[in-house]
Amino acid sequence: MDPLAHALFGGALAKSPVGRRSPLSAAALVVGSIAPDVDLITWWLGGRDAWIKAHAGLTHSPVGLVLLGLALVPFLRWVEREFTSRHSVFAVGGRPGTCATAVMVGLALHVPLDLLTDHGARPGYPLTGAWVRADLVHPTDPFLWLLFGGAAALAGKRSAFGSIALSLAVFCGWALIHSHGNAPGWLQWAFLGTSVLLGWMRAAEVGRKGSRVILARCAGLGCLYLVLLFASRADSVARVRKALAESAPDATLLGAHPTFGHPLRWSMLARKGREVLRFEVIWGRAPVLVATPQQPEHMLVQTALRLEESEIWRSGARVPVGTVTEDADGSAEVELRDLAEADRPWDEVLRWRFRFPADQVQSIRQMFEEAERSRRR
């Protein structure tokens, strides 16, 4: 999931008894909830390839979570001792380790949330780089922002700092929806209107004295939302399987991918030979086959998928497809992209491009022609 969802989830947890065990427990829950995404720094340090190699790997494994805990706990406990009120549990010789509990709870719940998405994580890293995904939730889900943010806003006590932080979260969420190329037009206004309603309820003291009731209701709504997604996904999978049985019985279903802002709409991918078929399905409706640019039989696409230069990109791509653009001078550019990430804001960023000079194109063509002649013999 995106860092905003993790931060709001940590804010909701902060209203639970774990968030009240020490002066810094609430902040520790938020920090712990987003800390595993620190691997984003690899993009700034080493570029895109470094991030693809590190993303959702070590910091999302038990070893990485323990290391993050060992780094965060002493720091946050020092902050608590030095900068919080004199009535801190540490200053009066109270229970040690209460802040540590909050950090570890935040860290432990980060990965299960990621595993619900179709992006997933690699919890077995470094022993195995296998991705684990439930294919249930979109990595960026505005409905979860509202659910987690509503729990954080309405459960228990209020503070000026909390109101400012939640207002900033609303602005970030609205900006992300507004900048998303495929977001439905009504979504940004529905998100803003619901956020205003939650702000009014917060100002009206709704839930101030019943934090456990608010958290329980939000947890129940979250479970109902996941059940709705599961039922929608199961129906869409069944419809696509039926369509494939009639039109392409030799095709293999690759996966189901949720659509941003459409809980009942799914993108289904199936492989037929080397070609990937993409279906768009809305719960209760027949699947629609969507044309996707790809040239699976092209010799340059097949070559690019075997190159050492594209190895790091391939390790992170779930359904790689490729297209070729040929120039008048005989050179050509191959673009590889992950069809599982199609139409998402980061789709363009994650594509891999390689230019073949004219002489290399000619040698590859000769190699494939010789291989074809040998096969025919």
Image (tube, rainbow, N blue to C red):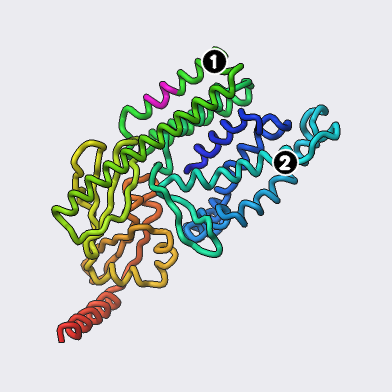
Mark 2 surroundings: few (<14), some (14-19) or many (≥20) residues within 10 A: some
292 lies above or below 361: above
For the stretch drawn in magenta, the main secondary structure is helix
Which residue position is annotated with label 2? 76
Q: Is residue 28 left or right of residue 149?
A: right
As measured in the structure, the alpha-carbon distance from the residue carrying label 1 to the one carrying label 2 is: 31 Å
Residue 125 is drawn in which quadrant?
bottom right
Residue nearest the observer in this picture, 22 or 250: 250
**Residue visible at 68% across and 34% down?**
25
The label on residue 37 is none
Query: Residue 268's x, y, as percent?
Result: 28, 49
Amino acid identity at mark 2: Leu
Q: Is residue 101 visible?
A: yes
Highlighted magenta segment, given as a residue range: 190-194
Q: The residue tagged with tag 2: helix, strand or loop?
A: helix
**Residue visible at 23% across and 68% down?**
298
Q: Is residue 44 left or right of residue 173?
A: right
Q: The residue tagged with tag 1: helix, strand or loop?
A: loop
Query: Residue 155's x, y, as percent?
Result: 57, 23
Which residue position is annotated with label 1? 206
Q: Is residue 326 visible?
A: no
Q: Is residue 246 magenta?
A: no
Mark 1 or mark 2: name the one nearer the start of the chain.
2
